[in-house]
Amino acid sequence: MTKPAWQLGAIMTCSTLVNPASGLSDESVYVDMRLSMLREPLKDSRSIGVQALLDDLYLLADECGKANWDGHGAVPVSPDALANAEAFIRCLRMDLREASLGATSKGWVTIQWGVGPRWTLSIAVTADGWLHWAALFGSERAHGTTPFLGSIPKNLVERIQRACIT
């Protein structure tokens, strides 16, 4: 399967915003470089990294990349929404990567976590960089919209963690 052109931009965006060097000294830069060399193979592994979700995203791009992909007039998933979704996925902590991907008729990418129909969180990633989310935890409901600025907002990380509780 070919990887779309939007992939490289998403990788650069997330890696530069999420993994900056933590210090300015030569030693700090060296330690950060060495740690990065150790993290990268794990981050891209299929079993504990992002590769399984990225493979699902590439498949979604193929399946939903044409107009009327759902048979009911849906617009194609936009390259910008795919790039933003990839950047979002690359920012997930390793313990929060068990998710399902989907698409909306507006051309957005959805990422969903949950252990059942009444314990779930869904986030729609838009082409213009917004995260629209809705959560259902038993009888508790919550929803909101927040910009995606290269890292996942703390309130969403907490909701993702909660959605993954079994």
Image (spheres, helix red, strand yellow):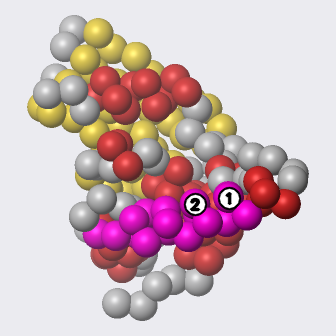
Please, is residue 136 above or below residue 81 in the view? above
Looking at the image, which is closer to me, 50 or 109?
50
Q: Report the span colored magenta.
A: 30-46
Q: Position of residue 110 (x, y in %)?
A: 39, 50
Residue 14: name its quadrant: bottom right
Label 1 crowding class (10 Å Cα cut-off): few <14, some 14-19, many 20+? some
Circles 2 and 1, Cβ within 8 Å, touching? The answer is yes
Distance between mark 2 and mark 1 Cα atoms: 6 Å
Q: Position of residue 7 (x, y in %)?
A: 56, 75
* Element at label 1: helix
The residue shown at (65%, 50%) is 18
Q: Position of residue 158 (x, y in %)?
A: 43, 24
Please, is residue 1 above or below residue 13 in the view? below
Residue 41: name its quadrant: bottom left
Looking at the image, which is closer to me, 112 or 93?
93
The residue shown at (62%, 43%) is 151
Q: Where does label 2 land, which residue?
A: 35
Judge from the rendering whether residue 51 lies leftward or rightward of residue 27; answer left or right. left
Disc 2 residue type (three-letter): Leu
